[in-house]
Image (tube, grey):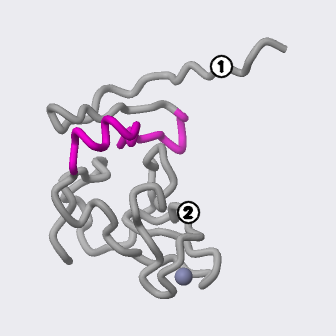
Amino acid sequence: MGPRSRVDEGEGVGEGKGEVRKRTSVFCHRPAVYSIRCDKCKGSNIQWSEFKGMIWCYKCKVDTKGTGGIFDGPIPIQLCDIMGLRFDRISLKTKKVSRYNLETGKFGPWETLEVDRGKE
Ligand SMILES: [Zn+2]
């Protein structure tokens, strides 16, 4: 195991280390937005895998760990803020959102996301 990112995926940290575990939440942006690429083909045609800490590559058709992306180094917090890059997590089960506070480095409580579907 390499060094962990400062923005961890949160849930169940420290439990079942080394095991393949099902993901219970995803970050709000696609992995490519965080500069993550497939570690096999270096492509960016990827999505979060159903497994924790993994990505799915559409080209290689495998679950793989991917490159570290911006999680590899200190994350430029102010820059992320300016660029609108967020680390909020979305629960796959409840669709609730836990917002990541860039200043405190902590995830907030799970909230129901108000989805504006527009006026039909
Ligand atoms: Zn690939």
Residue visible at 23% across and 54% down? Answer: 13
**Helix, strand or loop at mark 2:** strand
Which comes sooner in the sequence, label 2 or label 1? 2
For the view shown, which residue lies furthest in the right direction? 120
Q: Which residue is mark 2?
A: 47
Seen from the viewer's position, the closer of residues 74 and 14 is: 74
Which amino acid type corresponds to the residue marked 1 in the rendered image? Asp
Q: Local crowd at mark 2 within 10 Å, few (<14), some, or many (≥20)?
A: many
| Residue 99 position (above or below residue 59) | above
Give residue 20's quadrant in the image.
Answer: bottom left
Q: Which residue is mark 1?
A: 116
Residue 32 falls inside the magenta stretch: no
| Residue 69 position (above or below residue 120) | below
Instruction: Write the start and end of the magenta stretch as one range.
Output: 76-95
> What x and y, as percent, mark residue 40?
47, 87
Residue visible at 85% across and 14% down? Answer: 120
